[in-house]
Image: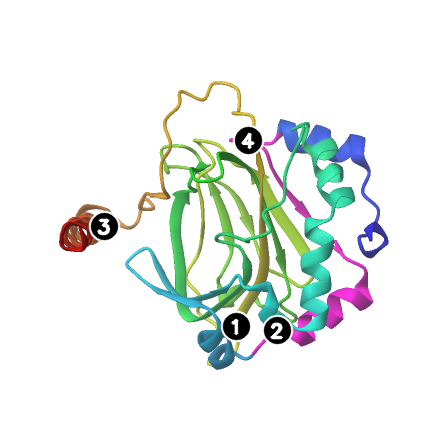
């Protein structure tokens, strides 16, 4: 299936990837065979259909984004893309390109799959969860493929790359058609999506895949965590007011949920 991907100069790519700052990241244009990319573009569901098929986010940190991870709901071209991105040849290619041995695809597409973001949507700067506890997998690589034709700079929706303190932005990539961006996932791989200012009816469309290893990365101290968000330098109110309130509300909901589960378990004894 690798003939669906345009050739990559492996030596040159690896050198650029591992030399990128503040952490290894990349951008590849014309990633897929053009005809195949067009088929995928045409197979994205309308936003309202995506809402019915997937999960929609509406938190302080992530808004107006729909995610579809159930591959049984994919159109044929999207299913073919999913099979390509999970194939052993493709995964082995990325082990070679990144120098991370024994990469594994995620058949469950946790956090990945089809992503569609509507006008005024955004994703705040963050580092991703680093460990899937029930499968004992370490997250190592993010790859995002974009399918947005005629995307204009004033539409926003850029992938931005930040330093670990979220003080300096090092990368800024438009989600243009048939572009693949990604990075090695780590404790300093802070990234986000700038707010969308596109017209009504224009969606930011992408397909995301994440790759794992059974082996822990070098230097892992055994600490697992969920997604960690940080405010951009111009987001003082969000970082000092909105995010803490959101975190407190989430913690309270978790306490209530655990209490209900404990009570249910007690009553069932």
Residue 29 is one of the magenta-drawn residues: yes
From the image, tell me which residue sits under label 1: 203
Q: In this view, does 104 lie to the left or right of 261?
A: right
> Between marks 3 and 2, how big is the CA–CA gap?
32 Å
> Between marks 4 and 3, how big is the CA–CA gap?
27 Å
From the image, tell me which residue sits under label 3: 243
Instruction: Please name whichever residue, 51 or 134, is drawn nearer the observer in this view of the structure.
Output: 134
> Between marks 2 and 1, how big is the CA–CA gap?
10 Å
**Mark sitting earlier along the chain (3/1):** 1
Please rate how many residues cluster around mark 2, counting C-alpha atoms within 10 Å: few if below 14, some from 14 to 19, many from 20. many
From the image, tell me which residue sits under label 4: 21
> Between marks 3 and 1, how big is the CA–CA gap?
26 Å
**Mark sitting earlier along the chain (4/1):** 4
- The answer to whether the residue labelled 2 contacts the one labelled 1, judged by CB atoms less than 8 Å apart, is yes
Residue 44: which numbered mark, if any? 2
- The answer to whether the residue labelled 4 contacts the one labelled 3, judged by CB atoms less than 8 Å apart, is no
Instruction: Please name whichever residue, 145 or 105, is drawn nearer the observer in this view of the structure.
Output: 105
Nearest to the eye among marks 4 and 1: give it: 1
Mark 2 element type: loop
**The quarter of the displayed image where residue 147 is located:** bottom right
**Mark sitting earlier along the chain (4/3):** 4
């Amino acid at each position: 299936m690798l003939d669906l991907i345009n050739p990559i100069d492996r030596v040159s790519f690896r050198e650029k990837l591992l030399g990128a700052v503040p952490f290894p990241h990349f951008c590849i244009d014309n990633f897929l065979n053009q005809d195949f990319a067009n088929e995928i573009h045409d197979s994205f569901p309308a936003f309202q259909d995506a809402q019915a098929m997937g999960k929609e986010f509406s938190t302080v940190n992530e808004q107006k984004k729909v995610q579809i991870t159930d591959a049984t709901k994919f159109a044929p071209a999207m299913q073919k893309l999913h099979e390509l991105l999970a194939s052993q040849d493709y995964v082995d290619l990325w082990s070679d390109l990144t120098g991370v041995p024994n990469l594994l695809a995620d058949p469950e597409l946790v956090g990945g799959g089809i992503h569609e973001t509507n006008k005024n949507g955004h994703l705040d700067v963050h580092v991703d969860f680093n460990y899937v506890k029930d499968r004992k997998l370490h997250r190592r690589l993010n790859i995002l493929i974009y399918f947005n034709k005629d995307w204009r700079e004033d539409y926003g929706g850029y992938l931005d790359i930040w330093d670990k303190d979220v003080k300096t932005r090092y990368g800024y990539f438009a989600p243009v058609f048939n572009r693949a961006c990604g990075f090695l996932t780590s404790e300093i791989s802070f990234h986000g999506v700038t707010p969308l200012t596109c017209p009504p009816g224009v969606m930011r469309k992408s397909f995301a895949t994440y790759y794992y290893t059974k082996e822990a990365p070098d230097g892992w101290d055994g600490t697992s965590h969920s997604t960690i968000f940080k405010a951009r330098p111009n987001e003082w109110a969000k970082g000092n007011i909105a995010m803490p309130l959101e975190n407190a509300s989430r913690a309270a909901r978790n306490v209530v949920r655990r209490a209900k589960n404990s009570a249910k378990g007690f009553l069932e004894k």
